[in-house]
Each structure stands twice: as structure tokens, then as C-alpha cells.
Amino acid sequence: METLHTVTTDSAVGPLFLAASDGGLVALEFDARGPGQQSIRPNPRDIRKGNHREEKLNETVVFEHSPRRLRPYIEEIEEYFAGQRRAFTFPLDLRGTAFQLACWRALLAIPYGETRTYADIARAVGKPNAFRAVGMANNRNPIAIVVPCHRVIASDGTLCGYGGGLDVKRKLLELEGALTRTLAA
């Protein structure tokens, strides 16, 4: 059985839920999610309580509230929001299909303060016509902010689609200094 260590922390864009395995960060999710958005978090109706520290989702994953263990992740996220960090150094435990992983690695290659289009990411993963599939991979990105899908914009230069909402996407891009005249409009 795998244990995922979890914590919810406050941030400049609202509460963030973090989950990490022994291999690295598995999830960073906005507390407020839209209908149909994926989440690693268990549905409260499905949880069987083990004790006050653990929640069992199924027979393969246990969620354990672990603020001390996740402190290094929280510190880097706090530094990011304070404008003191441009790159995260903690390990990631990305889990997805081969295509999703390729897309998420392409997102990780977008420099701080820059944006790319869905078409740019499709070309980067060797599938130039798969921009819609890239959009779906971004939608399934389990590690918001750190795997920077907020840096992906529409081909016409406007903001579009973001799990945390367009206001949060705008705030993240403003923080990074990535808003162009088109994006700021």
C-alpha cells in the first residue's frame, strides 16, 4: 500500500492541496475546483476513516496528513509567491500517460516569465496537429503552478482554460511578469 503525504496550505491564490509520495510531489491542486475537474483527493463519500491522521481511498493508497514532511515543498511555493523563486527544486512524481508526460515535460521547459501556445506545445512533443490533445493533457495536469500550465495561452494571445480559473491564471502570469498587452486586455 502506498502512502501519500498531504497538507493544505494557504497561498496568494487561495488554499492549495499538496500530496507527495516518497518519490516527490504527486499533486498540487487548487482547493476550489470546478465541476468535473480531476482530483487526487478522495471523495469524502468514498473514504473509510482509519484514524484522525489517515484517510484510506482504496486498498492501494493511504492519505496521511503530514505538514512537517511537506514543509520543504511549502517553503518553495511560499518563495515563489513572494517573488523570490523562479524554479522549483523539489522532486516530482509525475503520473500519467506517455503523451501526458511528454506534454507536462514540455510545460516544465517553458521559462519563468514566458508563455507558449497550445500549438507550440504540440510541436514540442512532436505532434503538431494535437493542440486539442495538449489542452486535455494540460487539463489533467496534477501539479498546478509547479508544472506551469498557466503559461499556456491561446494562439491569438488571449488567456484561456485554467483549472484554478482565469483570475488565478492572470495572477500567476502577473507575478511572473508574463502579461503582454494582449493578455492584459
Image (cartoon, grey):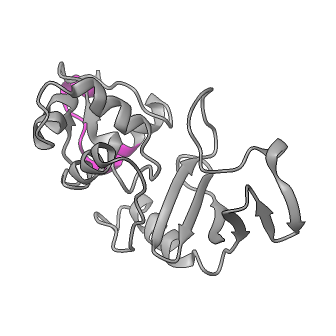
Q: Residue at x 88, y 69 (%)?
A: 52
Labels in figure, total: 0
**17 left or right of 185?**
right
* Residue 174 visible, this angle: no
Residue 116 belongs to magenta span: no
Closer to us: 120 or 16: 120
Closer to us: 7 or 78: 7
Residue 109 rendering spot, x and y as whole percentages:
19, 55
**53 left or right of 20?**
right
Residue 159 rendering spot, x and y as whole percentages:
32, 26
With respect to residue 17, does 103 lie above or below? above
Q: Residue at x 10, y 40 (%)?
A: 126
Residue 10 rendering spot, x and y as whole percentages:
62, 57
Q: Residue at x 66, y 63 (%)?
A: 60
The quarter of the picture where the N terminus appears is bottom right
Q: Quadrant of residue 119?
A: top left
What's the magenta region?
172-184
Of helix, strand and loop, which mostly describes the magenta segment? helix
* Residue 33 visible, this angle: yes
With respect to residue 133, does 9 lie above or below? below
**40 left or right of 90?**
right
Residue 167 rendering spot, x and y as whole percentages:
46, 32
The quarter of the picture where the C terminus appears is top left
With respect to residue 52, does 133 lie above or below? above
**33 left or right of 90?**
right
